[in-house]
Amino acid sequence: MLEFALPGFTFLSHFLLTHFNFDLSHYNYIFLLIISIGMAWRHFLQLFVTPLSSALAYLSDSFTCRIEVQGQDSIYRYLMYWVVHHRSMTRAKHLLASNMLSVGGRYVHIRASLDPSQDDNEPEYQSGDNFDEWWNKVIKQRQTQPLHFIPSTEEHHFLYASPWYSWCFWRWIKFQRTKSSEDTYVNDRIVISCWGLPLCNWGLGMLKQLLAEAQQTWLDKDQDKVEIWSARGGAWHPCDGRVPRPLDSVVLDQETKAGVLADIARFLMNKTVYEVRGLPYRRGYLLHGPPGTGKTSLCYAIAGHLKLPIYVIDPSSSSLDENSFRTLFSELPSRCIVMMEDVDCTDITKSRAPGHDKNDQNMMMSGRPPLTQNGISLSVLLNAIDGVDASEGRILMMTSNHAEKLDAALIRPGRVDMRIEFKYAARDEMESYFKTFYSPLHTLRHVMQIQHGDRVPMITSGDVDRLACDFAAQIPTGQLTVAELQGHLLEHKDDPQAAIGNLEVLLQKTKTQRDERVKEQLKEQQVEMKKEREKTLSKEIEMERRLQREESPAERKKYHLRSRGRIGY
């Protein structure tokens, strides 16, 4: 029996007896007792402990409520910020000390992602301070910032109190960070769980209350910033918020600005009207004009004024294909602004040549499909904007420096409901911007110090108004953009008189730059026209060779007449 239970026991007993005169047979009862206890324990585990463990695991799973948060969602940042600042993290056994955090598939600075307010604590530069001393203070503060500790990728437990559940004021919450690589990006995932009764909403309601508290904590800290999302890899990823720009700082005539805001307000408040009349609940705007006139600034100012999130997408991005582009637009939430900047810079939105359709028709008649572009086609872009599966409630804002280059199908009514033209700054706009820039309430302190070290007394509001009139009077209307005006004023941010005195230099410099830009544009147009002619000629030659190989002489003659416009199709 021992040989059956312990293979090799007979050989070992004989070896010890022969060489060491030690007889194991006297201890057989001990070995039998140990073997019996082991077999009994194994049967006990199989009969009682294993089923009991399975039952306990089943009960634990049945009475455990869980909520999962994906890393690309904004709730992820809400929850991480709340947990990092929770007092239980000071007693955690395993933390991750790092300045980088994976958020939505990309690594960002923890300071910028979870506590961007720390950047606002830099020592402020005061007029009269020595730059080197002030800058050394800034660098020293950034180098000696507090260390950041975040929960590691394992289970963490903490007590959470909720005033909504008086019968059980405290509850153990399990917090777990995991990573999954289901797609091309490595995304974080958070699972929070606790004991409760799902049917009675006990436990799950507490988890929902925890998330609501985390969201409110984040919003209380960051409620004044514009929420920005960017398209990357076929999904929307959160970006750092931006401080909203005041509408008064956007240089645009008040009538146009008020008209845009009124139109958006009518759209937002008339959802029922759209539904009753069977109209798609979408609105589109085209902001066009010379570069630097404030098109993008108006988008951010409107988003900050209306507290709407901005979703930025680039149709010409190499990381997007047709399926991901459709998915991005279909996943847009209602009440948001979708911004596409410089849509005239991508080939898919440019106006098609008059012979474009004719050339494609010729190729289709010859049995060959028309040439397609890599990435996103114009039809996909148009269908994503107002197709059957397009999201509703969103506001589309496209910016363009050359609206005349855009395809007519892209800017037709229904896709673009309102066009806002941005021009060079007018006299009243320059005067208003000068007042805003040099307002004593915003920038001027007790004493202004200019480059030469001379101290200039603080100017009053009346002085600013007078200087603004002089400034605007010396600039011809339609000569400067907002960006050029802003750059000039920044060079003389502490001395408005110097800004007025150096206007001639600015105007001459601007004129020279524009002349050079016009020459470059003419050269680019000539190169594009040459390429288009060569492309058309190569298509005709290719078609002619194909017809010569495959078609009859009568068909070749007919093709020659068509290509020369003598007969129709």
Image (tube, rainbow, N blue to C red):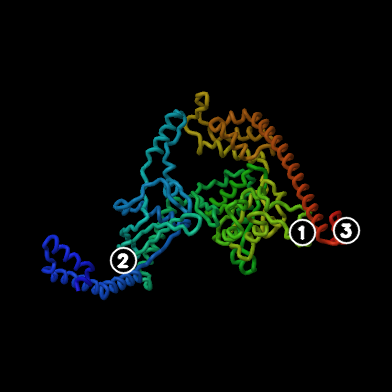
Residue 155 lies left or right of residue 454; in this view the side is left
Along the line of sight, the residue nearer the viewer: 157 or 283 = 157
Neighbour class for label 1 at 10 Å: few (<14), some, many (≥20)?
some
Q: Say which amino acid is labelled 3.
A: Lys
Which residue has dot 1 on it?
363
Q: Say which amino acid is labelled 2.
A: Ser
Q: Earlier in the sequence, mark 1 or mark 3?
A: 1
* Distance between the alpha carbons at the discs numbered 1 and 2: 75 Å
Q: Say which amino acid is labelled 1.
A: Met
x, y percent for residue 288: 67, 48
Residue at the limit of the structure toward the front, as seen here: 18
Along the line of sight, the residue nearer the viewer: 67 or 248 = 67
Q: Earlier in the sequence, mark 3 or mark 2?
A: 2
x, y percent for residue 273: 62, 66
* Distance between the alpha carbons at the discs numbered 1 and 3: 17 Å
Provide the secondary structure element on which disc 1 rests.
helix
Vertical arrangement, residue 524 with respect to residue 151, above or below: above
Marks 1 and 2: CB-CB under 8 Å?
no
Number of the front mark, 1 or 3: 3
Vertical arrangement, residue 264 with respect to residue 455, above or below: below
Label at residue 557: 3
Which residue has dot 2 on it?
166
x, y percent for residue 189: 42, 58
Q: Earlier in the sequence, mark 1 or mark 2?
A: 2
Instruction: Name the quadrant containing residue 370.
Output: bottom right
Provide the secondary structure element on which disc 3 rests.
helix
Give the quadrant of the C terminus.
bottom right
Along the line of sight, the residue nearer the viewer: 188 or 266 = 188
